[in-house]
Amino acid sequence: MTASKGYAAQSATTPLAPFSFERRAVGPHDVQFEILYCGVCHSDLHVARNEWGGTHYPIVPGHEIVGRVTKVGGHVKKFKAGDLAGVGCLVDSCRDCDNCKKGLEQFCRNGSTGTYNGADKKSGGYTYGGYSNQIVADESFVLKISDKLPLEGVAPLLCAGITTYSPLRHWKVGKGHKVAVVGLGGLGHMAVKLAASFGAEVTMLSTSPSKEKDARHLGAHHFALTKDAAQVKALAGKFNFIIDTVSAEHNYNDYLAMLDTDSVMICVGAPPTPSQIVAFNLIGGRKSLAGSLIGGLPETQEMLDYCAEHNIVSDVEVIRMDYINEAYERMLKGDVKYRFVIDMKTL
Ligand code: NAP
Ligand code: ZN
Ligand code: ZN
């Protein structure tokens, strides 16, 4: 076991604070690395505050992790000490079921293990995430990180990047498609960058007028303010795809109305409260409402390689570890440009 330190919440209502714990000893297939940067995902906040239910305390959030390898087990082939490495939202799965064999470990029939709050099949208890100084994971769940891109901008690709890349690829979004992205936060800004880089015509749908200039700079061709009924009405029937990244309760029916015939709205945002869908909004125009969960390991590596090749990183605000509670409050207000990333030197 290795003594480790991090930041944890002890209950749904306590702020995150310094916390000491142990990581498992490096096994034959394990990679251990020093964490240099960890992105702050809205899921971290949902889980730290038990908004989805099922949080085990203490919770150390963080699943957008990059760092430098310090030690590898005897059977490890992909990494050696000194290499850059990353861990996203998963650290284990059965590797044997049909979904795992297809590289869809996020849908493992036997339950994949989340990077935090996951039932830890190796050490017992629950996994601790990336708001910490080091991590140990099986090499099959550790990603190769290019040295071409700034590491702090790469960290958010491990969740925000793959969560938007995966549905865009699955539905083959590209040239000739009109795509709307709802919510300009961590996921939203990556959806804009990736959809634009795949050749789609991108419209940003935001509640924040102050984000228009940035949206265009990120690659959006159009911007609409969803608080303005006239702008919303003008978008009726316009889009082939809508990627909804909103973290809080909102009316899905408003967006379904913006889909063209035979078009798809993809939910990646995961508000804690359920919503009502009016069936007529799907029936008229043969529309689909879909969802997507992060991405499997092979596709995560493909996305990282694509971003390295096309020079795509997240736009980040680097913060100190002890700023995390303020960062959460700002995230709740939509005041994120466009991902907080913790500099782990400050832990
Ligand atoms: P974020 O950075 O906080 O961005 C969310 C954005 O949604 C905000 O910046 C805001 O953008 C918009 N928004 C917030 N409240 C709203 C409301 N009441 N009505 C309309 N728009 C609102 O969050 P994130 O890290 O991108 O995560 C977004 C959601 O995706 C979270 O629920 C998270 O848990 C989930 N998630 C899902 C997956 C998956 O695999 N499916 C993976 C990661 C995260 P504007 O200011 O532009 O309106
Ligand atoms: Zn996430
Ligand atoms: Zn499986």
Image (tube, rainbow, N blue to C red):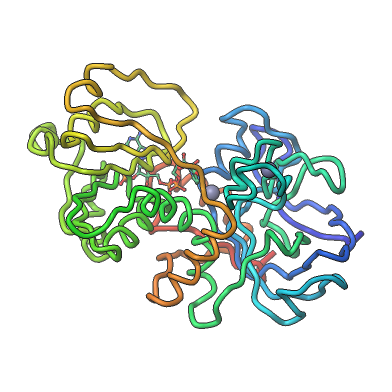
Q: Does residue 285 appear left or right of residue 253 in this picture?
A: left
Question: In which quarter of the view is residue 28 placed?
Answer: bottom right
Residue drawn 84% across the image and 57% down it: 23
- Which residue is nearer to you in this view: 131 or 113? 113
- Residue 186 is situated, as x and y percent measured from the top left of the image, at 42, 53
On screen, residue 103 above or below 57:
below
Q: Quadrant of the N terminus?
A: bottom right
On screen, residue 91 above or below 144:
above
- Which residue is nearer to you in this view: 102 or 316? 102
Residue drawn 82% across the image and 72% down it: 72
Q: Does residue 183 appear left or right of residue 239 in this picture?
A: right
For the question of whether residue 326 can be seen, the reply is: no
- Which residue is nearer to you in this view: 12 or 30? 30
Residue drawn 81% across the image and 64% down it: 30
Q: Quadrant of the C terminus?
A: bottom right
On screen, residue 200 above or below 328:
below
- Residue 78 is situated, as x and y percent measured from the top left of the image, at 71, 74
Question: In which quarter of the view is residue 309 placed?
Answer: bottom left
Q: Does residue 313 appear left or right of residue 56 in this picture?
A: left
For the question of whether residue 201 can be seen, the reply is: yes
- Residue 15 is situated, as x and y percent measured from the top left of the image, at 64, 42
Residue drawn 24% across the image and 66% down it: 217
Number of labelled discs?
0
- Residue 130 is situated, as x and y percent measured from the top left of the image, at 67, 57
- Which residue is nearer to you in this view: 153 or 324? 153
